Image (cartoon, helix red, strand yellow):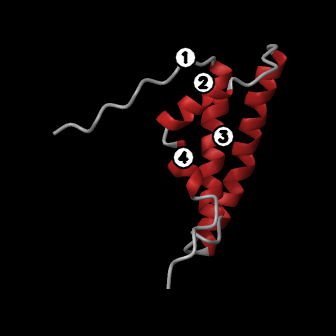
C-alpha cells in the first residue's frame, strides 16, 4: 500500500523556497538543542554549531527577498508550504512539552 500523497507545494520564488528551507533547518536544529528533548550534550553541541551556518543561510534568503523588492511575506502561501513540509511537527520540538498528568 502506498503512503497518502502529499498536497503539492504552493508556487514559491527561489528566495521564498530558500527562506522556508532555511527556516525549517533552523527549527530542526533548535529542536535538537532543546534541553526538554535532548539526550546528550554532544548532539546538542553539534546542532548548536550547525545553527550558526543555517541562521546565516536564513539571513541570506531574507536579504535576497528584500533586495528583490519582496517587502512583504505572503504568510498564507508560506504557511501552506510549511504544512506540506511537516513544519507543525518539526516546530513542536522547539517548545517545552506539556506537563504529564499524574
The single residue placed furthest to the front in the displayed view is 101
Viewer-side label of 2, 1: 2
Q: CA distance from mark 3 to mark 2?
A: 15 Å
Which residue: 70% across, 57% down? 49
Tag 4 residue: 88
Query: Dot 1 corresponds to which residue?
Result: 11
Q: For label 1, count other residues whose C-alpha is less than 10 Å away and answer few (under 14), some (14-19) or many (20+).
A: few
**Can you give x and y, in whole percent of width and height, for residue 99 in the image?**
57, 75
Q: Which badge, 4 or 1, comes first in the chain's sequence?
A: 1
Q: Secondary structure at mark 4?
A: helix
Question: Which mark, residue 23?
Answer: 3
Q: CA distance from mark 3 to mark 4?
A: 12 Å
Looking at the image, do the residues carrying marks 2 and 1 touch, with CB atoms under 8 Å apart? yes
Label 3 or label 1, whichever lies nearer to me, is: 1
Residue 17 visible somewhere in the drawing: no
Q: Secondary structure at mark 2?
A: helix
Q: In the rendered structure, find residue 77 and report the number of the disc placed on it.
A: 2
Q: Is residue 78 visible?
A: yes
- Which residue is at the front of the view, 78 or 50? 78
Amino acid at each position: 500500500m502506498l503512503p497518502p500523497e502529499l498536497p503539492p507545494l504552493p508556487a514559491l520564488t527561489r528566495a521564498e523556497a530558500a527562506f522556508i528551507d532555511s527556516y525549517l533547518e533552523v527549527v530542526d536544529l533548535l529542536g535538537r538543542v532543546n534541553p526538554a528533548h535532548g539526550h546528550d550534550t554532544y548532539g546538542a553541541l553539534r546542532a548548536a554549531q550547525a545553527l550558526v551556518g543555517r541562521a546565516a543561510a536564513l539571513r541570506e534568503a531574507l536579504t535576497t527577498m528584500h533586495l528583490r523588492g519582496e517587502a512583504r511575506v505572503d504568510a498564507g502561501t508560506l504557511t501552506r508550504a510549511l504544512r506540506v513540509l511537516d513544519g507543525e511537527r518539526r516546530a513542536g520540538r522547539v517548545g517545552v512539552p506539556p506537563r504529564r498528568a499524574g
